[in-house]
Amino acid sequence: MSVSPSGAGRYAPSPSGDLHFGNLRTAVLAWLFARRSGRRFLLRVEDIDTQRSSTESADRQIEDLLTLGLDFDGEVWNQQDRYPAYEAAVEELRARGLVYECYCSRREIREASGAPHVLPGCYPGTCRDLDDVTRDRRRAELAADNRVPALRLRAEVTEWTVRDHYAGDYTGEVDDLVLRRGGQCPDWAYNLAVTVDDAAQGVDQVVRGRDLLSSAPRQAYLAHLLGYPEVGYVHVPLVLGPERKRLAKRDGAVTLRQMLEHGSMAGVRSRIARSVGVDGVSDMGDLLERFDPAALPGDDVVWVAPDQRGR
Ligand code: GLU
């Protein structure tokens, strides 16, 4: 792995509950990749979803990551402090004619997305070319209900290719993605916030769960439009629950605090270490020395609750 003294990696959790085994494992992997390559390692609280985020949850997450033995450089960033930067990025795109208002409800998008020519999960472009009279009318209709329109990117491509450490060159769809959500509480959108913040923090290595690989082309395209440097992606396998879906709280004793009720901190660390391909670690420093990215198991890990193991 090449050493990048000026670069940074990061872990960027959304504070909507305690971190579970899958989140902790991804955090450890992000830390391992950053530290092994001589990068700084940053922590960013992705609390733009104002309905679901809480400061208490962010504090508990940070405490858990420190207890686990990870260390971070610099201040922890909160996305709620970053709104002026998101506004400025959207303004820059708007000045270049690359932003438009979207008045669609979720239902309208769902119905239109079912049309044969629309790729699944992609915005069908309903509001892209509306005339000014229609825009004024639709904006007024929303305003009467105390709502504002969403803002979307006028994408000039339909796909983009990123380079991923494990997936190689990955080409994925790019649609007219949301930059700011509409409605009564217009939150900034994840793809915008993550792109602006990674650039502002000098992040050049993004390690995260591979469920986000399909978002990477959208983010990389946005970064390209904003003139940001390219980042290197490392999308890692997920931890799945017993039903082979992304691990969730209902799958048993999955959070650090719950795991500690059933066992020791050393046990949790060695379980995480084993899941990334290293047996019998004594502490995080030992794991850092012995971790080999090439030996990371390629398959998703299936979670077995501590109280069900050995039965
Ligand atoms: N906040 C996202 C999450 O908790 C991660 C985003 C990212 O790493 O780009 O799933």
Image (cartoon, grey):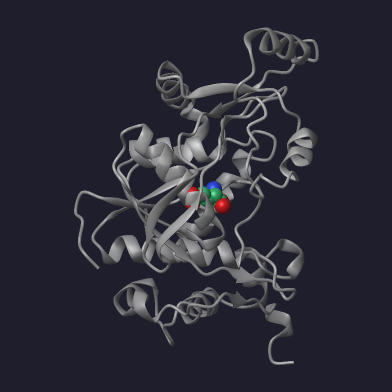
Q: Nearer the viewer, residue 39 or 18?
A: 39
Q: Quadrant of the C terminus?
A: bottom right
Name the residue at 25% across, 50% down. Answer: 7
Q: Position of residue 67 (x, y in %)?
A: 49, 62
Name the residue at 42% across, 77% down. Answer: 296
Name the residue at 44% across, 65% down. Answer: 28
- Whether residue 39 sits left or right of residue 182 in the image: it is left
Q: Nearer the viewer, residue 169 or 223?
A: 169
Rendered position, 268 above or below 120: below
Q: Position of residue 36 (x, y in %)?
A: 28, 67
Q: Nearer the viewer, residue 107 or 114?
A: 114
The answer to whether one can see residue 12 in this image is no
Q: Position of residue 123 (x, y in %)?
A: 64, 38
Query: Which residue in the rendered view is the most extreme toward the bottom?
Result: 311
Rendered position, 236 above or below 110: below
The answer to whether one can see residue 11 in this image is yes
Name the residue at 23% across, 60% down. Answer: 38
Q: Quadrant of the N terminus?
A: bottom left
